[in-house]
Each structure stands twice: as C-alpha cells, then as structure tokens.
Amino acid sequence: MSEEHRFEEEDFSGALTGRVVLRIIAQVKPYYLRVIGFILAIALVSFLDSYFTFLSKRIIDEGIAAKNFTALRQILIQYGALILVQAAAVFIFIYFAGILGEKVQYDLRKKLFNHLQRLSLSYYNVTPVGWIMSRVTSDSERVASLVTWRFLDFVWAALNIITATYFMIRINWRLGLIVVAIIPVLIIVAGQFKKKIIIEFRQVRKINSKITGSINENITGVRVIKAFSREKQNMLEFGNLTDQMYDAGFRAAWLSALFLPVVMIISAFALGSVIWFGGLQAQIGGMTIGGIQAFISYINFMIWPIQDLARVYAELQRSIASAERIFSLLDTNPDIYNLPEAISPQSLAGNISFEQVCFYYEEDEEVVLDDFSLEVSRGETIALVGPTGGGKSTIVNLLCRFFEPREGRIRINGTDYTKYTLESIQSKIGIVLQTPHLFSGTIEENIRYGKLDAAREEIIKAAKLAGAHEFIKTLDHGYQEDVGEGGNLLSVGQKQLVSLARAVLRKPDVFIMDEATSSVDTITEALIQRGMENLMENRTSFIIAHRLSTIKKADRILFIKDGEIAESGSHRELLKKKGLYYRLYTQQFRKDMALNLSSSSLLSTDS
Ligand SMILES: Nc1ncnc2c1ncn2[C@@H]1O[C@H](COP(=O)(O)OP(=O)(O)O)[C@@H](O)[C@H]1O
Ligand SMILES: [Mg+2]
C-alpha cells in the first residue's frame, strides 16, 4: 500500500534546507544565552589550542635554543595560567551543551506528547505506533544532539582551521599559504568518500529498519507463526535481510578503512613539503626549529576535522532528517477539533439523532455508513446486533466523536454535536470498549480515571455497582493491586468489570458498550451483565450486544448490516417478523441462552 510508504525513514532527505534550519534554531532560541556562552567557550578552547602550539614554538626557539631561562620561565607561567583558563572553558561548553541538549529534548518531547494527545483517532488509524514512538524517543534525542554535539563539531572544525591558519601565516606566511592550499584538496577527497560511505550506510539503515520491523512482527505474531508453522519460512526471510545488511555494511567498512590512509598520504605530502621547504628556510635563517615543529602540529590541527568530515556530515544529515520527521508530526493537524464558537453544555441527556450520516474511515476506502439515519429518545436503550463488519462499532465511534460524519450530522438535544466542545461530549459519555484498556497502576487508579477527584468511598461504591467489587476483594492487595502493563495481569472479564466501574464513576449521560465476544466465564459474565444494567438505568445507552439477556432487555434492537438498519424493533417484534434477527437468534443464541440460564441460577438473579 502506498500508505506504508509514508512512514519510510528515507522519505526524509536530511537536506540542509533553510526552512528546517530556521525551525531548529527556533527550538534553541529560548536558550540563546547558553548557546552564545557555548560558542564563546569553544572558540576560546580552540584558540588556546592553537596558541599553545605557538607557545611551544617560543619555548623551543626563545627559551631552549636561545638558552634564555627567564624567557622560558615567563612563557611557562603564561602556559600554565592559560591551561587553567582552557580547562574552565572546556567545563563551560560541555556543561552548557549538556543542559541545552536536555532542554531541547524535553521541549520537543513535551510538544510531541501534547500534539499526539490532540490528534484525532483517524491519525492513529493510519500511523504505526512504532513510527510515533521513534519520533518521541530517538528523533528528539537526535535533534538535541544536533544542536549540541553536531553543531560543536562544525564550530570546532571551522575554528581550528581558522586559528591554525592565522598562526601559521604569522610564523611564516609563504609556508602557511602552501599548507592552506592543500586544504581544498583534502576537502574534495573527503567529500568524495563521504558521498560513497553515506550511500552504503543509508543502505545499512534501510535494511536495519526492515529487520526491526520484521522482528517486531515476528514477536507480536509469534502465536500465529507457531500455529501455522511458519518459523522456517520466516527465518529464511530474516536471513535474507541480514545477508543484505552484511553486504552493505561490508562495503561501508571497506570504504571507511580506505579513507583514512588516503588522507594520511595527502597530509604526509603536506608535512613533507613543510619539512623540505622549512628546512631550506632554516638554512638561510627564515625559519626556526620551533617554527617547523609548530607547523607540523598545525597541519594535524587542520587535517583532523577534515578527515572526520564524512562522519560529521552523515550524522548531521541523520539529525536533520530526524528534525524533519518531528516537524512533519507536529504539522499534522487534528481532523477533529473544537470550533471557535463551540460550547460546553451542562448535560448531554436528551434525544440523539443521526441525520443522513455518511462516513468512511479514509479517502479511497469503502463507505461504511451511507445515508444513515436514527432517532433515539432520552433514556432509551438501544442494542446493536448484526454481522461483524456491519458498522456497529463505527456508529458508536461517531457518536463519541472519535470520528465525525463526512456528510450529514449528528444532533444531541437538537444541536449539531460539532457545536459542542470535544471535551464536553467525551466527558459525558461513558464507554466500555470491546477490548478494555487499562493503564499500568493500581485498580483504584484505573477506576479513578473516570473521575479524577473521586474519593475512595465513591470508587468502592462505583465498583460495587459495576459488580467489580467481588473480584477485587479477593485480590491480595484489593484496590491497590497492580494491574500490570495494559492491565494484562487481569483477565479480560476482570478488565471489563474495572472499566465498567470507571464508567459508573463518571455518571455519564450516555452509556456505550461494545460488548466483548470473547469467552468470559459465566459468573463474570453475569456480573458484567448486572453492572451494565445498573449503568443503563435512566440513561440513553447504546450496547453492541452479543448476550441474549442484554438484547432482550433493550428498548429497541437494531440489526445492522452493511451500514444500514436492516431491522428494528423489540425482541418480540423482531422474532415475530422471522427475518434476519430471528435467524441470528435461532442460530446463535440458543447456546447462549443455555449458558445464561445456568449463570443466572448460579447467582440467583432474575433473567
Ligand atoms: N478504524 C478503522 N479504520 C478503517 N476501517 C475500519 C475501521 N474500523 C472499522 N473499519 C471498517 O468499517 C466497516 C465496519 O466496521 P465496524 O464498525 O467495526 O463493524 P462492526 O463493529 O459491526 O463489526 C468494516 O468494513 C471495517 O473494515
Ligand atoms: Mg465492532
């Protein structure tokens, strides 16, 4: 699918465009004083490095060679004092860079997190979770290192070349110019290598992300893989990927290995000419031994950053690509947002109507609801039944405004619900999902999610009403029991009871439940049933029902098929009709009814 392509790492070029650079600068702007301090500190360190070499020259020429010990002592004192200054500067730039990096990373993560909360469900529908996670974790880290260490690499290299050039020309301008002339040659050679090495490394990364994806898929799908005995096939495919990665990695390693010797040969040429030319000059007195020695150091000063250029450039490109990805996420606008004039009603209790609603999840995907209309009066209980994929969940998704109708409208209390704020709608709807989601933490915390300021008594009351109290009591730590990541220490039925309690606590105006089809033991099922009934009382409720007992109690049953209400009426009416519902009932519910009877007698509830 073309959609997956959007999330390829390589779609973000990492080209150093003005737009991206400006936005990155904007990230750092609040901390501009630190940035200035940071640059000044590096400049000082770099200048002093060059200056020390110059001082070494003077030590040799003016002190040792001239046997002038007063001069020697003076220069050494100066040297020592400046070492202290340099040490302080090193401390400052590392410290500032560290803080700056942390701040930028923190800001980016916060921005991303806030933005992710604002994005509509439709975004998550098409965006792999792993992609989002990498933006928040590794990409923001890389942007932080871009504005600190990557930036440092460049400032450092540039300053080293400038200060070394300055001192070389000061010592001997002719020889200085010869050395400076070699710099472009070095840069061109380094640039050529850089290009090739980057291409290979990019290949490595591309395959690497495929491998990660494959590992991910294999881990999450391990049960299916085992069930279908696909281990061998998957191993083969995986082996293929690792082979490709090895080849590209091998070429990259070869080029990297070759690069350094080539640079060394060129620099040897530069050194050779210095010694040769310097030696000649020394004979006629234009150059001292200390001067030649200093030149040799300065050449190393300039070569070191240049030979590092390939790495620095590749890392720079990667960091820029990270920044681009982060910005692309931040630039995504939520599809669903509050209108400027949106209001927050006190209550959503009232009639609900779908008016000629047309809906599809994605452009170019099939239309799920077409010209769908439905009137529900206040307090009514609606059961939605019908085949999988018929559109039941879609209807409740729309009602919760997780998605909005593409055409037509939904009215609550006579008002188009897009005129209400999202928060007011979503805070007044209690929803229990098919696969209930709990957050890591205790049971109490998870129930409290329904109403953050609830007292403990309220929570226990809600749990009792939802029918969750019984099982919670039996846990070692009761309400303080840890539910594990995603609640996975609890069974599906228990999770559902906890989310029911959460919904009860919220005292919603509208209650929605996407009933689980998964097999819950009969006692839990009866508990859930009773909890639901408590919640549905006096509330407009939409229940996607699989249990006969729920369906029978509903005021109205809607048989949803292909996005349409194929049949509608009470249990009795629909049975009489001998249509779709009747067939469903006779095929599916007989078994269910037997189960229901036994569980009812178990708990001696009426049914
Ligand atoms: N999040 C989604 N993104 C894209 N398509 C979806 C999504 N959820 C459901 N669909 C599609 O919408 C149709 C109706 O699905 P759904 O409302 O889940 O039906 P039901 O709940 O009755 O089983 C199906 O064709 C399904 O593939
Ligand atoms: Mg569904």
Image: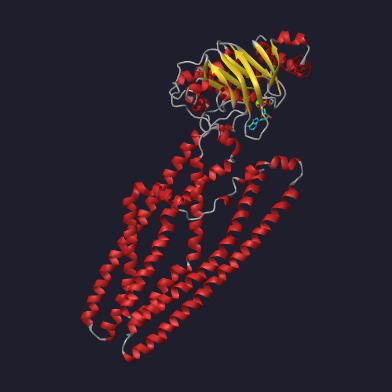
Residue at (63% x, 29% y) in the render: 360
Q: Is residue 263 left or right of residue 599?
A: left
- In front of the other: 268 or 522: 268
> In the rendered view, would you say 209 is above or below 393?
below
Q: Where is 232 relative to 157, above or below?
A: above
Residue 144, placed above or below residue 444: below
Labels in figure, total: 0
Q: Residue at x 49, y 34 (%)?
A: 117
Position of the C terminus by quadrant: top right
Horizontal side of 192 relative to 52 (left or right) equals right
Q: Which quarter of the picture shows residue 295?
A: bottom left
- Across and down, in percent, residue 454 comes to 45, 21
Q: 46 or 155, which lies in front?
A: 155
Q: Quadrant of residue 495?
A: top right
* Scheme by which the image is coloured: secondary structure
Percent from the top left, x then y, of residue 256? 56, 68
Residue 189's x, y, as percent? 52, 71
Left or right of residue 585, residue 274 in this image: left
**Residue 541 image-quadrant placement:** top right
Vertical side of 50 occupied by 476: above or below: above
Q: Image quadrant for the N terminus?
A: top right
**Residue 11, image x, y percentages:** 57, 50
**Horizontal side, residue 118 vs residue 560: left or right:** left
Taking the image in four quarters, ligand 2 sits in the one at top right
Would you say residue 432 is visible in this rendering? no
Q: Among all residues in the image, which is located at the extreme left?
A: 70
- Front in this rendered view, residue 196 or 556: 196
Say whether residue 70 is visible.
yes
Q: Residue at x 59, y 45 (%)?
A: 7
